[in-house]
Image: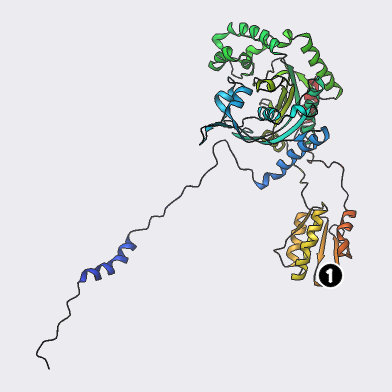
Amino acid sequence: MSGKKPMKKPASKPVKAVKAATAPAAAAAAPVKKRTVATPQTPRGMKDILPSEAKYWRAVRTAGERLAAAYGFEWIETPIVEETALFVRGVGKQTDIVEKEMFTFVDQGGDELALRPEATAAIARAYINHGMLNMPQPVKLFYHGPMFRHERPQAGRYRQFHQFGFETIGEQKPVVDAELIICVHRFFLDLGLQVKVEVNSIGTAADREQYREKLVAYYRQHRNVLCENCKVRLSKNPLRVLDCKEPGCEPLKQGAPQIVDVLSEDSKNHFMKVLEYLEDAEVPFELNPYLVRGLDYYSHTVFEAVFPAREGGSKSAAAAGGRYDGLIELLGGRPTPGAGFAIGLERTILEMKERQIIPLDESKPVVFLAQLGEPAKRKAFKIFDDLRRAGIPAAVAFSKDALKAQMEVANRMGVKYTLLIGQKEVLDGTIIIRDMEAGIQEMVDANKVTGEIAKKLVTAPLAPLTAPAPRDSVSEESSRKEGDSSG
């Protein structure tokens, strides 16, 4: 044996052991801070349109599209982003839209762009860009989509809002003005809403120049009571003073000169013919000698459709428009007359809700397809597509296996017929049609079921868009008053 003593293992240092032992305790003693992330919100003045609102939006779009088809207007869509210069030149540099309300930005290439605040100037640009002057005139177009203005949000008014509009370009006859006003009135009538149309003529540029002189002379006498905005308008855009709702300004309007007194004979004759067409069409209207509209491109006929004022409230403009004979030339095209209007869809939907007018859902299914078992489920895909292609509103719940659960869905939807297919029907090549109201069932050839269902369904040529409002939502007395006030 060796005389060497065995080496002792070095004593382990307790530090690591202490750390290992104390680390969990220390971690337990210090609570873990949870990181909170703020949920993004919609920008001020903008809103989500949820599925629960869909029936209202479908109703207003359908009302507009039906009128467009009936009166020969074709759909157009312009970009949401346009050159800022388009609206500065077209709408007017000194209008509130251009001065205060446009969303503008400079893109990565250095171009000055704007979210469209309105559609007429953009459609006039498209008319010029695509040589529509060479098409048969007039060119009749309709559009719907979002617009953007940095306004103070309030009920029915948002910074992103939606409009439905008609434009007729290439014809200056007064019948065009009347046709557009009639379309506005019919739009609201089809939705079960009452509106009164206010109309005026602002004549030609020469007429307006004469009128401006008289208007400025009148308001200068009352300058000390004008609001600060109107003092600026008086030098930049005097006609806008007539739009002011400030307590000191609005009463002065009643004593202001009226533009009808300076209209040329041609302007008067044009306007009188428009009014005659409206009378013959039985469209209720009211002459408003102080209606001027806020955009520079308007001439001759201008109009607004307003909802009846409620007790203690003010009237609400639902649509507005007019003639713009100088706009195409202003944007670099040949002198071309035009006229159009835009309907505010948010305000329209708000009025429908307040009047308790419920849209009828045209997409509501009338047939439910129930299947039992895998072979039936596979067969049901083809049958369901056949129904869809035939234009029959149908529903199915492929994810539900139990027949009872599927029938509960069918009952909840209120369908007229349920088609039943199980393993036996797949083998026999048949399908069962169940009348949900009568409780009667019949078996038919699966290949002929679409035709059999089509025979059973009765469709109206023009189905109503909304159900009648409750009788007490709009009193008969107020209806009579509104009728008495029309021209």
Residue 359's quadrant in the figure? top right
Q: How is the image coloured?
A: rainbow
Which quarter of the figure is the N terminus placed in?
Answer: bottom left
Above or below: residue 447 compared with residue 183? below
Above or below: residue 365 compared with residue 61? below
Front position in the image: 287 or 13: 13
Which quarter of the figure is the C terminus placed in?
Answer: top right
Residue 319's quadrant in the figure? top right
Front position in the image: 336 or 183: 336
Q: Which residue is mark 1?
A: 425
Left/right of residue 286 with respect to residue 88 in the rendered view: right
The spot of residue 92 in percent (x, y) is: 61, 21
Residue that appears at 81% across and 13% down: 269
Above or below: residue 15 compared with residue 438? below
The spot of residue 416 in percent (x, y) is: 83, 55
Residue 192's quadrant in the figure? top right
Q: Is residue 357 visible?
A: no
Above or below: residue 454 compared with residue 314? below
Q: Is residue 364 visible?
A: yes
SS at mark 1? helix
Label 1, residues with CA under 10 Å away: few <14, some 14-19, many ≥20: many
The spot of residue 300 in percent (x, y) is: 74, 17
Front position in the image: 289 or 133: 133
Residue that appears at 84% across and 70% down: 425
The spot of residue 69 in percent (x, y) is: 81, 36
Marks counted in the figure total: 1
Q: Amino acid at mark 1?
A: Glu
